Amino acid sequence: MANVVVVGAQWGDEGKGKIVDWLSEQADVVVRFQGGHNAGHTLVIGEKVYKLSLLPSGVVRPGKLSVIGNGVVLDPHALAGEVARLSEQGVSISRENLRVAENATLILSIHRELDALRESGSAGTKIGTTKRGIGPAYEDKAGRRAIRLMDLADLSALPEKIERLLTHHNALRRGFGLEEFGADAIYEELASVAPKVLPYMDAVWRLLDEERRAGKRILFEGAQGALLDVDHGTYPFVTSSNTVAGQAATGSGLGPGSVGYVLGIAKAYTTRVGEGPFPTELFDETGELIGQKGKEFGVVTGRKRRCGWFDATLVRQTVSTSGIDGIALTKLDILDGFETIKIGVGYKLDGEIIDYFPASQGAQARVEPIYEEIEGWSGSTAGARSWADLPAQAIKYVRRVEELIGAPVAVLSTSPERDDTILMKNPFEG
């Protein structure tokens, strides 16, 4: 048996929620290891639709332990709100099925306001963040001035930590010409929410080690996508954490030897929310049609997603940087009915043909996609649950994707319904 890491192989929104939920039936523990409540997952289970931002997708399943690791930046008010919303939908959440790392960094109102100020300002580069304070919280973590979940357990020691935090933030606020934050307001913000989140606190690294030693199956759930990784993504149009599979170990406290099979999630086409390069983006009726058929709007923000053809060069690169063993290809049904379908197979950069996506921001903006055209199919793939249900051309498309990205398609998803899934390789069997 292998533990499984699920990561997005594009710019996020690949359908990780459904796949993680589908895999969590076999898992004992589901772990979030990076990001924050900027990640949106929609789960469709029977007649019920669950929208999650911070909680691991396994939390809607009875008998599963959900864990928020130290690599996540945690908005305690967002956590309390999400727990309350799910409770209204009949999902019971307690210490029995949810634990949060004691050393997780907290997102405060001061982070959210700074994020919005930067993103709305006219100067500098617009990144396209969700303005939820994710980046500023990670900055404070790296700057060693962050307030962590464990700090809420000793309120008497909080004032000194708040003062250290405000020394940095109030200097920034003066630069923006804004009124300084008061220490009392921050203290009240934290003290008021402490009783709602402290019951879930635990030494997660130790808990996960015990679960691993007991032979429990662990599923690591990534947020966003590998192309938004702060090191390996389309910098600076990235998130503020590492989103590649290697972060599963660091962001949970388990050693890299505990990470087994890496499952990358990729749409059968490409989407992106926010700013940044997108070589195969479509600005025509085809792009609009893909967006309409795929209902391409962000779960968290409601923002319209940019749409384009599948970019095999980009996914091949994330297969390498995340050590992806197999791909879960989602939304194949959205391509039903297209007479021809294009796949990006390389780029032209300043007249030269290249087979990788360059790291330079300027070069990323200049690359032009090289396409391979494939015959489409008129039959429907929607709801297919076996290869026999697929049109021959759809199978050819999947096989060509496998060749181009250098990884097998282990799972094929043909609708948002969790059972509309074709399994070629069970990741938990290594």
Image (spheres, rainbow, N blue to C red):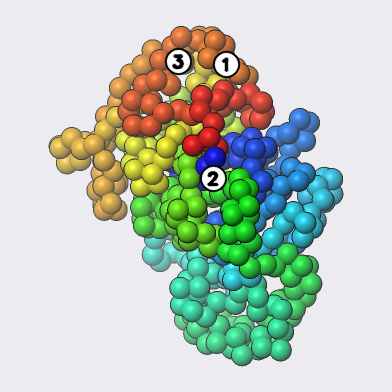
Q: Nearer the viewer, mark 2 or mark 1?
A: 2
Residue that badge 1 annotates: 386
Q: Is residue 273 visible?
A: no
Q: Residue at label 3?
A: 395
Query: Which type of secondary structure does the marked residue at label 2 adopt?
Result: loop
Amino acid carrying mark 2 in the image: Asn
Mark 3 vs mark 2, CA separation in Å: 29 Å
Which amino acid does the dot numbered 3 rest on? Ile
Kindly indicate whether the residue at mark 3 contacts the one at mark 1 (C-beta within 8 angstroms). no
181 on left or right of 124: right
The label on residue 327 is none
- Please state if 288 lies on the left or on the right of 297 as rendered: left
The span from disc 2 to disc 1 (Cα, nearest Å) is: 25 Å
Residue linked to disc 2? 3
Quarter of image, res 75 = bottom right
- Mark 3 residue element: helix
> Which of the 4 image quarters holds residue 192?
bottom right
Q: Residues within 10 Å of mark 2 (few under 14, many from 20)?
A: many
Q: Percent from the top left, x then y, of residue 6?
A: 52, 43
Dot 2 or dot 1, earlier in sequence: 2
Spatial distance from mark 1 to mark 3, Cα to Cα?
11 Å
Which residue appears at 24% of the width and 36% of the height? 355
x and y, in percent, of residue 28 in the image? 66, 46
Is residue 193 depicted above or below 234 in this figure? Answer: below
Q: Which numbered disc, 3 or 2, marks the residue that appears first in the sequence?
A: 2
User: Three-letter amino acid code at disc 1?
Assistant: Ser
